[in-house]
Amino acid sequence: MERALKVEKTRFDTKLTKVQKELFELATKIGGYRTLTDFMLSTAEEKAKTIVQQHEAILASERDKKIFFDAIMNPPQPNQRLRDAAKRYKEFNNQSAEA
């Protein structure tokens, strides 16, 4: 028989205006959520994930930008395979121009 994993829980309390609560309760009903808590947790988690993903994308793009510009500004010396390929390319283009 499988046992359910025990998930540690904690509390989160907040104060909100009456207008906010009424809006959230309406959204709970319209959205088909069982309870106001389900609605609040679901929407807050969804928004939190979006914010974190956007932040990670920005960090990745900043890191990629740094790597790209570093490679442009400080290119590595060509290795032997690249020099050989460039030589073959030049030879091929010279033959094509003569034909």
Image: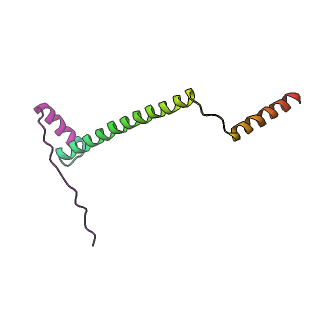
At which x and y percent is residue 30?
A: 23, 41
Quadrant (top left, top right, bottom left, bottom right) of the C terminus: top right
Tell how many labels. Answer: 0
Closest to the observer, 44 or 84: 84
Q: Is residue 37 above or below residue 88?
A: below
Task: Look at 52% across and 30% down and name the residue there.
Answer: 70
Magenta stretch: dominant SS? loop
In percent of the image, x 22 and y 46: which residue is there? 33
Outermost residue toward the top in this view: 73
Q: Is residue 27 magenta?
A: yes
The picture places residue 87, in percent across and down from the top left corner, at 77, 35
Q: Is residue 34 magenta?
A: no
Residue 39 image position (x, y, % from top left): 22, 43
Quarter holding residue 85? top right
Judged left or right of residue 70, residue 96 is: right
Return the residue nearer the eye: 80 or 47: 80
Instruction: Pick the quarter of the image with the N terminus.
Output: bottom left
Residue range in magenta is 1-28
Of 83 and 24, the residue lying toward us: 83
Residue sitting farthest toward the bottom = 1
- What residue appears at the point 85 percent right and 32 percent down from the top-left corner? 95
Q: Residue at x 48, y 31 (%)?
A: 66
Residue furthest toward the right? Answer: 99
| Residue 2 image offset from top left, x and y in percent | 28, 69
**Residue sitting nearer the eye, 58 or 49:** 58
